[in-house]
Amino acid sequence: MARSQPGTSVIVFEPQLCTGCRYCEIACAVWHCGRIDVTRSRIRILFDEGRTAERYAAVNCQHCDDAICCAVCPSEALQKDQKTGWVTQNSTKCVGCEMCIVACPLSVPIFDPALKVAVKCDFCLGAPECVKHCSSGALRLCAREEAVQLNARLYLSAKDDR
């Protein structure tokens, strides 16, 4: 997989394609902590048995244009990278207060007890492992503008099967 172009790509999730294999979580955990420990994955797959369609949902950083996690971070460990558009983290500055977790509408950052800091998607330095290992194509890279439109269609329009 080619690296994404800075500032042009974000990760999107298409729930109708997800099989629930959780390879994305495994790939993320191995990339970031060197072992299979999905509790330390920076992407989470949620399962809703009661739904007839789109049973799976991915919880992953959207690298928001106006990232509230950055605004609430008292140590400025989270910053919006103007070049890439990604919300980046400097773990050496993190004080472990967990304000970013509370403030994030999706509760994307997780507290890593081994590192004693909050962690979140770092886009795997431009080649996201979760996307690379998603065999169904439910996770993919796309232009930020396309992602906004796709997310609006998937999550803001009325659904009959909920």
Image (cartoon, rainbow, N blue to C red):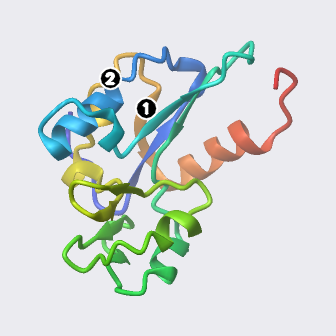
In front of the other: 59 or 99: 99
How far is mark 1 from mark 2, CA to CA? 11 Å
1 or 2: tag closer to the N-terminus: 2
Q: Is residue 84 above or below residue 40?
A: below
Specify the quadrant of the image occupied by residue 52. top right
Label annotation for residue 55:
none
Q: Quadrant of residue 80?
A: bottom left
Determine the residue positioned at 58% across, 53% down: 106
The amino acid type of the residue labelled 2 equals Tyr
Residue 54 appears in the rendering: yes
Tell me the quadrant of the picture where the N terminus can be found: top left
Look at mark 1 in the image and give the residue it sits on: 139
Q: Percent x, y for residue 61?
A: 45, 53
Return the mark for residue 23.
2
Question: Mark 1 falls on what kind of element?
Answer: strand
Is residue 67 visible to the viewer in this orientation of the structure? Answer: no
Q: Judging from the image, what secondary structure is the residue with disc 2 in?
A: helix
